[in-house]
Amino acid sequence: MEFSENFCKIQNKESETILNLIDRGRRAQILENRSRIIPSVESVLFCGLAELPLRGHRDHGDLKLSEPDENDGVFRALLRFKIRSGDKALERHISTAAQNATYIIWNLQNQIIAAIDSIIRQTISSEVKKSRFFTLIADETMDCATQSQFSMCLRYVDMDDLHIRERFLCFSELSSTCAENISENILNILKDNDLDGNLLRGQAYDGCSAMSGEFNGVQAKVKNAYPKALYVHCLSHQLNLCLTHASTVHQIRNAIDVIAEVGNFFSKSPNRSNQLALSIKENTDDDVLARKLKTLCVTRWVESHVAVLRFIEIFPA
């Protein structure tokens, strides 16, 4: 009788089947798990927007609500702050979650960062597809771990407001800096980000032979694959070369040397720096906010430009 009554209820839609009940319970579990991971995602986003490091000296094990003896990083400190601010759901999760389901370990943080990276790339790719035609800007440099990193940016017209955009797309490690490897890397990046190389209209690199070579350079190999991708020697790099060549002029070289030496003279002594700050306050206008010289950077022309402007601004002092 019980079996027959249950059968009639299910047939008459008065009750759900076991499979539906199990599925509904699974959906509820998914929603609960998502709510548990939200604080971790928000904390990673906060650290990224504020350019803060996530990890500390000791950032493993259970999350304790009391202040740790050693710095356990901004990420854990944020979660602790959320709990103290009254986030009962997070506090319940931290106190009841299984050891393998706390959603705060370093591996999960990396997965969240990777997901954010994927969303950003998809957004940029969508904008480029709407614009259709685009140019790539690329260069290679060495990071603090002495690994060759290839940086790539895209330049295109934003069709929503008709402004030119330059978006950094990605870093990628290079096993070799030969033209063959770099050009292959570029084509793979375009493919991985679902960008149609046939709509590529420009390439901008520095003027070294590996990048600009007419027959075996990166620009030539990319142009063989996509003939309408014209090569342009990066204008900022050309300006840097102009400044470098201008420094061979006797008067200009002496002026740059004086600026560099004066900057070093003050930066190496706290007493001199304090005296300079007092002199700036007494001998310059009130709208001059600078209180010290900027060190002349020998590699970044933009910072060199700022250093020269700063020197001129506080020259009376």
Image (cartoon, rainbow, N blue to C red):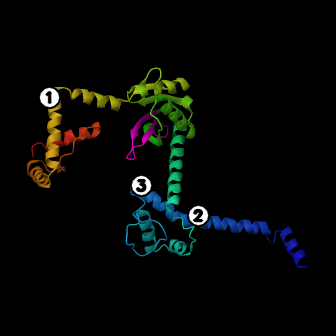
Residue visible at 42% across and 27% down in the picture? 210
Please provide the residue range marked out in magenta. 136-161
Front one among 223 and 184: 184
Disc 2 or 3, which lies upstream in sequence?
2
Amino acid type, residue under disc 2 in the picture: Arg
- Residue 316 locus on image (x, y percent): 9, 43
Q: Which mark is residue 49?
A: 3
Disc 1 or 2, which lies upstream in sequence?
2
Residue visible at 74% across and 68% down in the picture? 22
SS for dot 3:
helix
> Is residue 287 among what the camera can see?
no
Residue 141 part of the magenta segment: yes
Question: Mark 2 — residue?
Answer: 34
Looking at the rendered image, the quarter that the N terminus falls into is bottom right
SS for dot 2:
helix
User: How far apart are the alpha carbons under marks 1 and 3?
Assistant: 45 Å
Residue 242 part of the magenta segment: no
Q: Is residue 162 left or right of residue 144?
A: right
User: How far apart are the alpha carbons under marks 1 and 2?
Assistant: 66 Å
Residue visible at 40% across and 58% down in the picture? 53
Front one among 65 and 268: 268
Q: Quadrant of residue 192?
A: top right
**Above or below 12: residue 146:** above
> Is residue 299 among what the camera can see?
yes
> How dense is the environment of label 3, judged by Cα within 10 Å: few (below 14), some, or many (20 and up)?
few
Question: Mark 1 — residue?
Answer: 251
Amino acid type, residue under disc 1 in the picture: Gln
Amino acid type, residue under disc 3 in the picture: Leu
